[in-house]
């Protein structure tokens, strides 16, 4: 991976340059942090011509290492007004790696509103007209583009909400079965791609070969070691059986941190109906499948394909976050209704997490009642079609709350709180406060509730540093950090792939440096530490059933950055 | 003035306490800055129970000094997320002064949505039910309350947009003729009052006497001196002839800083039709009047009463800002249409400045065409009635732009830019950037375009300090600063009224300290200097006809606070 591809949407010209040597150890999220700090004015309008959008696979992309194909998408977020890296599984990351592309940088903005398409293959890069795809949803877009460019191409696309620059618009990436079910979702990536007037990116890697590790023998041994780990790890094996949905009952019953009915409880009486292992086994007998890989070569396979009671396909990749936020948080205990909502969100390109938080607020606004999945589905169509009401909801939680005069709003830096209640998971709560990303569980998750603030801060810090490393390599958190593959062995892998001789401490230093670069962007964008706060209701309203409140003091929150 | 009145809307209890000695030299805006810093958590939700709303007349309130009855209303703004003081003429400030009330502090929030009324007279304070007034506009509210409580009472009220917590909802104060035409408008005061569930405050000062100056003789001499100044000052006399509307042609033709057609030009070909002296003289022959006092005892009398061509009353207080933002900025050159828009905005309680900026954005959103006053009036009704579209527009410029995916947005800290183009008035531009209030011309206006950034910074600083002083005394900028009454003579007046022996330098120090207190609140609320910026288009798009851009560098902007 040694090429940087620049696409200037003002002039509609592309250029390819060698990646500069100072980017050698940067990839994915860390490369994004560097480029955004170097090239984007932190106070620019996120939907204007000065913002840039960077697609960067991780350092391992294109190698044969399992689960190393996550794609990081970076930009100044129109939702948080800060730096953003949103990453996604699917097939694009690996193909960009094999094509030797370290980053695609989308710059500028066309003067008119016509849509464009970027096509990338071994012959080069081209910008093609795509106005004929205007208004199409993701499935129709992918169908048309695969017809035109080949069924094995990867398609990255936005749907109508992205074209309309809604803040909960995602960027979809086709999965291993060619469907647009994997999404870089958080912080408005679809809106920024829409603002660049790019409908889709088509990637064809035919004719390429896997990227070779610098130390082939060490690499092969580490692949074996990792494969053994996955086979033996209970955590990894559990993912294969019921994926991330296992979190539903665990969080509802053990940690009591499952957001329920617009964050008014941490346990949901319907959790077993939508996430218990028995339910999963029943669904398997009707045609649903678990143990599905979202990226080529994944060994953990935590994804799924969901069919209805008659075995008809509904959706793929129905993850914990989606079921929690569209189910428990809306008081909905019908897993098929939730699957239908997920399918709609995939097709319209809508962030499920932000959608669930927003629809929770819609209850306060009198637009929806808890448990009413039919009405929830109507509201998703309003968003997807961009009606006047849909445009409001399509801006996500913070804006919807403003428009309807609601002051109990579960957001940090304008981004909706995901499906880990910070009152019950105070480590994750510290992550929500301090991450430059806003409320983001993928920035540093830890299900525990620590006894002391100092412990919570330290645990969040360590989690954020490890995620920083993994996100820069293109690895998947669920394949490495969560099942517990040792960070020291990931270090060995970096050395094998890149021909380096780093210690884990070195890697941690790189992670720390990246976190500080992200924060530096936000400080320059106008954020002071006072922005690193949870909404007051998390500190004041006890969370049933254990009546936890988030009680890490503000001053200690600010000490997070003392490293 | 020595009493602080606290109204706890959680418990529906009131209390009256003596003003503490450390507040002796504080009044209006400076008292607000102190109390908000001491009592309101800077990161609280502005529409939640932790925000407080403070009504504070200036240090001179209730004295017989002319134009000293402006009322400052302070709160954490739901529009800017920072500290806010919004001040208003009318009759409330003087009456509170005569009643000996230095501040009313509204605290807490009821658990239910029922509306309340606060009644203040010499017998004390009471909270009365007011749910029967729900949804009423300002005129009907005032009519009913005057019927119930006496025709000479002052009524402070919100209308439906305030009840719905729209960010452009004002707080109306009845004028010298008893009409609700004076508004504390900027930054969402009506939304905060609505969040406290207070529909109105009725003030009855019967039985009170003017506040006596400590040094009666010096005070009487200064009143005479000021009266002579007003008689002799050309600036003050010009206000009497055509009020602030004289600004229309001056800004359009001389400074070229009149926002025109959504900030795409600084001159409007229709300026003479809506603001030239000849037009004003013609309107006077048809029944309109200029030289009207908005506050009791004002000598400058820059306000007006506008009648249509048949002499029928349309509105009062049709000021420069309203005509500029609802006229020039929307390409509307029909003064009667503008007067009708102003009348609607008064009655619905809508900030005319924010309305004009928002409707400019509505053109970009395809909701309106420039020059179409009939459609603009329809949209004002949508806001006033709170339709789905109206709720969007009712949140003002920044939110409307987000909902419609627009990236060219004339706001600073979320507040719409008023009718002084920062590209042509770079001093005012510096004020927009640096004021803790967001884009606010009343925070420190200067119509010049300075040759150097250093001069622009210094001129804005001096203007902001002087306004800080005047806003703390309850004086009117148009009666003192703009016609040029010497600040040294205002100092003498402070000494006479309060029995002090301050120099102008002392007063400046108090103004500086207040500005820094306001900024301290914002820094704690989460703002870093990067928030002190104009939107990029002001720096990049040349402003016709003189092709000015705003070119004060960011680093120099930040040097504003080096005092």
Image (tube, coloured by chain):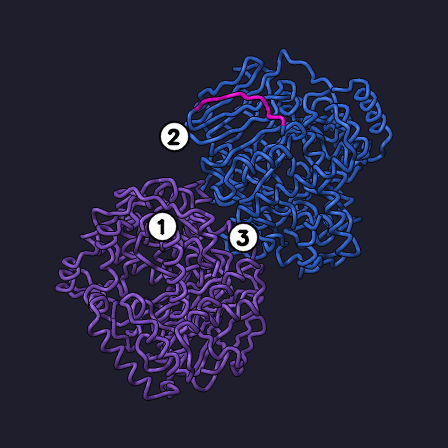
Chain colours: A purple, B blue
Give the SS element for disc 2: loop
Mark 3 → mark 2, Cα distance in angstroms: 34 Å
Residue holding disc 1: A452
Residue A334, disc: none
Where residue A432 appears, as percent x and y from the top left, is: 41, 54
Quadrant where the image shows the N terminus of chain A: bottom left
Give the SS element for disc 3: loop
Discs 3 and 2 share one subunit: no
Tell me where the magenta segment starts and ends, as one range.
B12-21
SS assignment for the magenta stretch, majority = strand
Q: Is residue A504 visible?
A: yes
Mark 2 → mark 1, Cα distance in angstroms: 36 Å
Chain of the residue that carries numbered disc 3 in the rendered image: A
Extreme residue toward the top, this view: B207
Chain of the residue that carries numbered disc 2 in the rendered image: B
**Pointer 3 local density, CA inside 10 Å: few below 14, some 14–19, many at least 20:** many
Nearer to the camera, A347 or A143: A347
Residue B112, disc: 2
Considering only vertical position in the picture, is A173 above or below B506?
below
**Pointer 1 local density, CA inside 10 Å: few below 14, some 14–19, many at least 20:** few
The tag earlier along the polypeptide, 3 or 1, is 1
Nearer to the camera, B282 or A29: A29
Residue holding disc 3: A528
Chain of the residue that carries numbered disc 1 in the rendered image: A
């Amino acid at each position: 991976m040694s090429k940087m591809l620049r696409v200037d949407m003002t002039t509609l010209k592309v250029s390819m340059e060698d990646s500069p040597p100072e980017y050698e150890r940067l990839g994915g999220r860390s490369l994004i942090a560097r480029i955004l700090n170097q090239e984007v004015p932190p106070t620019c309008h996120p939907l204007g011509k000065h913002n840039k959008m960077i697609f960067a696979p991780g350092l391992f992309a294109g190698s044969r290492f399992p689960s190393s194909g996550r794609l990081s998408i970076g930009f100044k977020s129109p939702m948080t007004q800060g730096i953003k890296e949103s990453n996604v599984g699917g097939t694009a990351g690996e193909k960009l790696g094999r094509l030797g592309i370290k980053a695609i940088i989308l710059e500028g903005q066309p003067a008119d509103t016509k849509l464009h398409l970027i096509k990338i293959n071994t012959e080069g890069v081209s910008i093609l007209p795509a106005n004929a795809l205007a208004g199409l949803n993701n499935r129709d877009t992918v169908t048309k583009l695969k017809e035109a460019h080949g069924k094995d191409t990867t398609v990255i696309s936005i749907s109508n909400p992205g074209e309309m620059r809604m803040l909960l618009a995602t960027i979809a990436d086709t999965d291993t079965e060619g469907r647009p079910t994997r999404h870089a979702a958080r912080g408005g990536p679809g809106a920024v791609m829409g603002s660049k007037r790019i409908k889709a990116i088509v990637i064809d890697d035919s004719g390429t070969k896997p990227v070779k590790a610098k130390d082939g023998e060490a690499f092969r041994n580490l692949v074996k070691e990792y494969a053994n780990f996955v086979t033996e790890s209970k955590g990894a094996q559990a993912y294969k059986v019921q994926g991330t949905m296992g979190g539903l009952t665990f969080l509802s019953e053990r940690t009591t941190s499952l957001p329920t009915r617009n964050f008014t409880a941490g346990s949901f009486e319907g959790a077993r109906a939508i996430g218990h292992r028995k339910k999963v086994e029943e669904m398997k007998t009707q045609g649903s499948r678990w143990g599905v890989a979202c990226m080529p070569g994944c060994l953990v396979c935590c994804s799924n394909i969901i069919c209805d009671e008659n075995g008809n396909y509904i959706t793929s990749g129905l993850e914990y976050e989606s079921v929690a936020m569209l189910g428990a948080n809306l008081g909905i205990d019908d897993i098929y209704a939730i699957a239908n909502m997920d399918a709609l969100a995939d097709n319209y390109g809508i962030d499920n997490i932000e959608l669930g938080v927003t629809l929770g607020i819609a209850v306060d606004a009198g637009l929806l009642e808890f448990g009413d999945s039919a009405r929830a589905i109507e509201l998703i169509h309003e968003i997807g079609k961009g009606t006047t009401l849909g445009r409001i909801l399509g801006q996500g939680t913070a804006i919807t709350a403003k428009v309807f005069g609601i002051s109990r709003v579960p957001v940090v830096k304008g981004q909706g709180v995901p499906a880990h209640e910070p009152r019950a998971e105070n480590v994750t709560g510290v992550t929500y406060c301090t991450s430059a990303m806003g409320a983001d569980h993928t920035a540093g998750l830890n299900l525990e509730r620590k006894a002391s603030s100092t412990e919570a801060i330290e645990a969040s810090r360590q989690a954020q540093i490890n995620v920083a490393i993994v996100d820069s390599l293109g690895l998947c958190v669920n394949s490495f950090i969560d099942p517990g593959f040792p960070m020291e062995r990931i270090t060995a892998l970096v050395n094998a792939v890149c021909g380096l001789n780093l210690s884990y401490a070195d890697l941690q230093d790189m992670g720390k440096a990246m976190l500080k670069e992200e924060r530096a962007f936000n400080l320059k964008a106008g954020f002071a530490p006072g922005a690193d706060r949870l909404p007051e209701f998390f500190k004041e309203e006890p969370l049933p059933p254990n009546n936890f409140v988030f009680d890490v003091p503000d001053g200690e929150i600010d000490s997070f950055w003392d490293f």
